[in-house]
Image: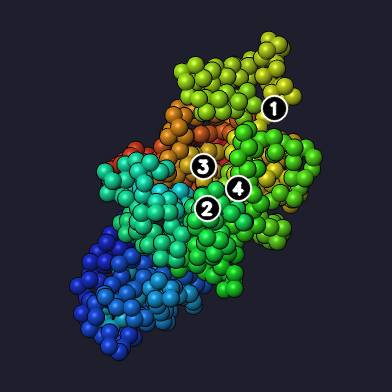
Amino acid sequence: MTTNLNPRARRDFIIKFASVSGSLAGVSLLSACGGSTDNAMLQFNYGVASGDPLADRVILWTHAKYEGLKDSVVLTYQVATDASFATIVSTGTATASESAGFTAKADATGLTAGRDYYYRFICNGWISPVGFTRTLPATSVTSVKFAVFSCTLYSAGYFNAYDSAVKSGAQYAVHLGDYIYEYGSDPTTFGNGDAATLGRVTAPATDIVSLEDYRTRYALYRTDPSLKALHAIMPWITVWDDHEFANNAWLDGADNHNSATQGAWSARKAIAARVYHEWMPIRVQDPANLLKIYRRFDFGNIFTLHMVDTRNEGRDKQYDAYNDADGGLTRYATALTSGTDATHRMMSVTQQNWLTSGMAASTATWQIMGNQDIMARMWFPASVLQAQAVASASPTTANQQALLTSVSSYLLAKATPAAARTPTQAALISTTTNPRLPYNLDAWDGYPIQRETILQTVKAQGNKLITISGDSHNAWFTNVSTLAGVKVGVEFAGSSVTSPGFESAGLGGFAGSLDGTVVVPGGYGLGMGLVDDLNYAETLRRGYLLMTATAASVKGEYVYVDTIKSTTYAASTGKTITVSAVDMSVSYA
């Protein structure tokens, strides 16, 4: 039997039971701790969390520490079908030790598919806050609702998107990376400008490098009440991106890593991976290799979710990470045309084969790829990219006007029927005289041959592909197409929770030019913008994606919050996009 509480009931339960737990702190339910710590206060300062649900199990997480002591805490976890814990269906022990930063995780087994559960941790009468979780659905499920997040910079503002999701009715949370950021608290650093005013100054004050640094940063994030509430109310499925390590990380380094002052990259990467596994409710795939986190989840017969790692597991150095004057475009173009790009990879061949073979084996209607970076071709006309580069390097009024002129000239040429175009307009539209070039070589655009190989394989399989992506801090909906322009799937890319997007560079009003709505107001999917495969863009607001999947369709609602600078906010749906399973056609509302 499947039980489901409505979102308000679940939220009210969590809030109520958290306060009840505190009042029961002196009640001796079990004696699991023992020893000289019996009279010490046990603290659960960072709440509880669950994650990596399967049909018969789920990972449970907490942080437990005796006040003023470093003794290990042996906890008993309980999973029940009722709020009073009268019917306990899974129980066991988990230890919060100093070696794990006093975090504790347990894989609660023996559960039923598609079932809601309550869980808690107890020790000598001390009771953690109560969490609410669920297993993956049975094959007979008819609908799945999940929320998608990325890019949560603590210092940039409040996590109102998390708070909104608590009330959304989502059953699962998917986080696509940048759960934390590694930057220090310097007010001039990215996103830190309002931190002191908002009371969101990061700790430690420097970029995080050591084991204690990373643990301190995760602990800071987990003090946020909205984040704690969302962890407590639904299971999370997560993957890291670069900032859980350092900005623009790749296999052997990162833009924001200096070996001379911060030590070996391999050591920092190992520390970051270790602490990620300590603080996230994630199931370890390989105890001997914590950097292996790609894995998949079957949501009945509706969809299989393939969570990939395009950041640390096998990524080659980005073309734009060599400090070339042109941002790496010449290096990229040379590699692509010469064929050497065939060995330039976002992920290892092993992971690539795991991904495509898993899609081939899945019997679900949809194949959803949980992906850090934008996979679609975000190719801009070279004329616009060149003007933008000049304006960025020297933001004079004349250069800014030249950029606007380049945009409007291209859009006008594109909107003009081919037979009526002037020679100048024809040259702008021609990909020979005005080639299309990627604006972000850190995304899949910088690894086009491996992307092409994956897409051609998916196309041959006949699978219905949807990618969900983060990293860019803006909201996009695009076709996912081959280099020849053949549509293979679609991509829902969500806005950040707090991290600044295009608006921070003065390009917040750029969306209409990108997706073509400035040319055809209110029109979507017409290919009339600067980016051919882009059908919808939002470059001003922060928020998240609310996805509803059935055998007939996948619906994505772009939910935005009107501010991240106050905890008083309003959330609204900016655009609802539905993809049909019949022919992958798209409708907008």
Q: Where is residue 321 in the image (x, y as percent from the top left)?
A: 61, 44
Q: Position of residue 25 (x, y in %)?
A: 23, 76
Please give the residue where the numbered disc 1 appears in the rendered image: 435
Q: Mark 4 or mark 1, which is nearer to you?
A: 1
Q: Mark 2 or mark 4, which has the lower sequence index?
A: 2
Q: Mark 2 or mark 4, which is nearer to you?
A: 2
Q: How crowded is mark 3: few (under 14 residues within 10 Å), some or many (20 or more)?
A: many
Asked whether the beta carbons under mark 1 and mark 2 sit within 8 Å of each other, the answer is no
Q: Distance between the residues labelled 3 and 4?
A: 18 Å
Find numbered disc 4 in the image and state the secondary structure of the residue it sits on: strand
Q: Residue 472 carries which label?
A: 3
Please give the residue where the numbered disc 4 appears in the rendered image: 466
In the image, 378 versus 36, the foreground residue is 36
Q: Distance between the residues labelled 2 and 4?
A: 33 Å
| Occupied quadrant, residue 449 | top right
Q: Give the number of callouts.
A: 4
Asked whether the beta carbons under mark 3 and mark 1 sit within 8 Å of each other, the answer is no
Q: Distance between the residues labelled 3 and 1?
A: 23 Å
Which amino acid type corresponds to the residue marked 3 in the rendered image?
A: Ser
Which amino acid type corresponds to the residue marked 1 in the rendered image?
A: Pro
Please give the residue where the numbered disc 2 appears in the rendered image: 257
Residue farthest along the front direction in this orientation: 260
Q: Mark 1 or mark 2, which is nearer to you?
A: 2
Using the rendered image of the protein, determine whether residue 564 is visible from the camera's viewpoint: no
Q: Distance between the residues labelled 3 and 2?
A: 21 Å
Q: Position of residue 468 (x, y in %)?
A: 55, 48
